[in-house]
Image (cartoon, rainbow, N blue to C red):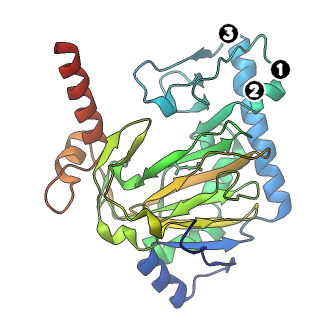
Amino acid sequence: MPAAAACIEPCPAQLSSDQIERFRADGYLAFDGFLDASRVAEGQAAMTELLRTLVERARGGELKLDRNPAAMRNYSGYRIMEPGTDTGVLFEPGLEIDLERMDFATLERSYRKFSTPSKGHGYFARLSADARLMWLLEPLLGPAPILYGDMALCKPPRIGSSKPWHQDSAYFLYEPFDAGVDVWIALDDATIENGCMFVLPGAHHLGPRRHEHRDDCTVADGRLDLTQAVPVELKAGGVLLFSVVLPHYTPPNRSERRRRAMQLFYRGAQTRLIGSDEKLANYRESDGTPASCAAAGQAANKKALGAADA
Ligand SMILES: O=C(O)CCC(=O)C(=O)O
């Protein structure tokens, strides 16, 4: 049973000083009604259009349906990507995807996420620069926040898999590592049953926690007090703003309803991009333990090599 429920308020045009203080203390703010019903419907339609375009291009031979043999389980499903980019769609792991035999409705119940949809559809590009979003972000990040990345996520009914506990700062290649805010926008009503976001209020103050590779890059056991987790059950159109260091998780979809959402990642204008070597070297727990997903990947490779040598 969750410890409590998140505080969800009507979406303001500007954050109050109390809200800014709560963001600093708890690491998140949740608001209803950031998007109205017509913009929610537009977002849902944009996800369908983006999938249709990628599937049609793959059916026509312009794009390839393949899998990444080196991926962790959560990313081991079929994918259709723009060559040489990180833009495309990823299907749920463990599903056999056959573009010729499967109809579109089935494919739409099989995918997990679009990466960088802002490069594939105008709706997401427009949303990433939405002035109302900037007004919410600027008090938290300073003027002119920079879009670091974006995704559109779907948890298909019954088979939508979980995203385990993690800090996005363990992935992201910029410094200072904590000068980022994630924006998660519900495009369906998000409930515990269909896989809403869970956060650990205040746990961003712990700083980097060691991550390891399991089915996904996830915080190592025993490093978080998960009894304090709270679900953020947003109505479609609601928005969750959270610190890039705040641990978060979404459970599997156990319902008959899909759960679509968008996630946009912003960094402060004062941040600078770094390479993975610098991330490996600098992103550590307070006792010096390497904590990044890059370090987790390195440890997993070493273990695999050790097992192969044994
Ligand atoms: O919407 C979700 O299921 C979780 C997304 C997330 O936290 C992530 O992919 O980093």
Query: Which of the two discs, 1 and 3, labels the residue nearer the N terminus?
Result: 3
What amino acid is labelled 1 in the image? Asp
Disc 1 element: loop
Say if mark 2 contacts mark 3, CB within 8 Å: no
Q: Does residue 290 lie above or below 98 as drawn? A: below
Q: Position of residue 265 (x, y in %)?
A: 50, 55
Say if mark 1 contacts mark 3, CB within 8 Å: no
Q: Can residue 21 be seen in this view?
A: yes
Which quadrant is home to the N terminus?
A: bottom right
Name the residue carrying label 2. 107
Q: Where is residue 89 in the image (x, y as percent from the top left)?
A: 62, 31
Between 122 and 299, the residue placed more toward the observer is: 299
Name the residue carrying label 3. 61
Q: Is residue 119 visible?
A: no
- Tell me what residue is drawn at x 58 percent, y 52 percent: 263
Left-right relation of 227 to 262: left
Front of the two marks 1 and 3: 1
Q: Does residue 93 lie above or below 295 as drawn? A: above
Q: Position of residue 299 (x, y in %)?
A: 23, 35
Name the residue carrying label 1. 103
Disc 3 element: loop
- CA separation, marks 1 and 3? 17 Å
What amino acid is labelled 2 in the image? Leu
In this view, the residue farthest toward the front is 1
Say if mark 1 contacts mark 2, CB within 8 Å: yes
Q: In which quarter of the image is residue 204?
A: bottom left
Which quadrant is home to the C terminus?
A: top left
- Tell me what residue is drawn at x 60 percent, y 14 percent: 64
Front of the two marks 2 and 3: 2
- Tell me what residue is drawn at x 59 percent, y 58 percent: 197
What amino acid is labelled 3 in the image? Gly
- CA separation, marks 1 and 2? 6 Å
